[in-house]
Amino acid sequence: MSVQTEPSSIAITLPEFSSKVLDYKPSALSGICPTKAFLCMLGLSVAFNLVLGFLAHYGGVALNWLGVNLGIVSREGIRELLLTFLEVAAVCALCAGIGTAFVLTVSRGIAAEIGMLVGIGVGLVTFLSFMLLPIIILGMGFIYCVVIGALCALITINQGVRSHCRNIGVYAGVGALSGAITYGVHILLVLLQGRDFYPIGLPLGASWLVGAIEAVLVVAVAAALSPSIVARLRYCETHSVWYDRKWKQGRIFANQEMVNAVYQAIESQSVEGLEGFASLSEETCPFLVFKARGCPKNGCDVELLATLYYREKDSQKKRLWFRILVPGTFGKEFIKSLNLQTVLPPLKKQQKPTPTSGNV
Ligand SMILES: [Zn+2]
């Protein structure tokens, strides 16, 4: 595989590893979820989300209070505001649309279909621009729901990881349940106050429809986020322990010599020849980013991956070179030789080369 790099236009070849190396690759989560872990996730999720639902409800009340006092929503709520805006927007859009179509077809003599199409377009744009403020207010309420959903997901992940659940489906299911409980608490509190239903987000006095969208949002975010985050983790089934949560990383300027040295080291599982490649402090393309994380038990496997960053037509591109497992002893030496660190220092932007020739 050859990658064209600018501006030096050196072509770097990323060698293909032998099947002996490539076959030993990190495996996905096993799908095992011990009964104890499942019950623990279920029980604690119910308990924690009852509390979260309570907090989210009063957080929403506080948001409403702020909204009213800042004059963003009226005391009557978004519904009245929405209806007022809707009436004005509809009348203005109708007038603008019909007016445009009339002017185009009658006084400009443009074909009726085209006049009508342009009229509809103008009407639509007018309508949307009038509805911008209520849309923003509704949007803020929905963002609050996304945050609540994310909190539900975090609770689920925390419980699942602690109790060694490796089943993505369980995370999705418990996440969805968490979201439902949290929103359910809000509904319950509203009903206990003997009031008509109102949504948890910013708008006051709005309908069940907004509430339904909110509930779906909370449940969907909680159900989708928890499995997608856990799927990035790795678990050692031999030692029954999660891999290091944080990657050790390093950036190193890439040239063919560097690439070949890494290739040789991994193929022969010996770090001889890997020393002397300094970490990059300034953005100089092309460069390789190495990442490593391992099972915390000494001597167990280490997951290694390398990505090449290069410039092509003024934009930075990246390409994964390898993602493999290596034996622990070699992995540890590899991390040491390339000086991979848990926290990657920020790259200084490269100075644009100033023109040295020509008139100043
Ligand atoms: Zn292990």
Image (cartoon, rainbow, N blue to C red):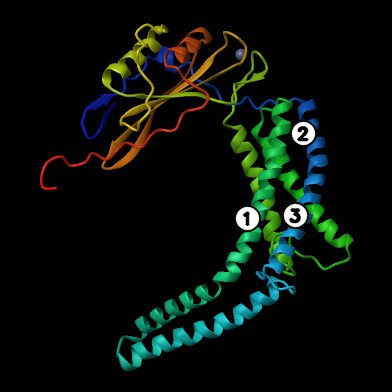
Packing grade of label 1 (10 A; few <14, some 14-19, many >=20) is some
Question: Which residue is the site of mark 3?
Answer: 59
Of residues 207 and 38, the one nearer the viewer is 207
Label 1 sits on a secondary structure element that is helix
Packing grade of label 2 (10 A; few <14, some 14-19, many >=20) is many
Badge nearest the viewer, 3 or 2: 3
Q: Is residue 9 left or right of residue 25?
A: left
In the figure, residue 112 lies in which quadrant?
bottom left
Question: Which residue is the site of mark 1?
Answer: 143
Of residues 134 and 337, the one nearer the viewer is 337
Q: Is residue 86 visible?
A: yes
Label 3 sits on a secondary structure element that is helix
Q: Residue at x 39, y 90 (%)?
A: 102
Q: Is residue 217 visible?
A: no
Badge nearest the viewer, 2 or 1: 1
Marked residue nearer the N-terminal end (2 or 1): 2
Q: Residue at x 66, y 55 (%)?
A: 144
Which of the image's four quarters has the N terminus? Answer: top left
What is the x, y in percent for residue 64? 73, 63
Tell me how far mark 3 sits from mark 2, CA to CA.
25 Å
Of residues 114 and 225, the one nearer the viewer is 225
Packing grade of label 3 (10 A; few <14, some 14-19, many >=20) is some
Q: Residue at x 71, y 25 (%)?
A: 164
Residue type at mark 3? Gly
Residue type at mark 2? Met
Question: Which residue is the site of mark 2?
Answer: 41
Q: Which mark is residue 84?
A: none
Residue type at mark 1? Ile
Disc 2 C-beta below 8 A from ligand 1 = no
80 in relation to 17, above or below: below
What is the x, y in percent for residue 277? 35, 17
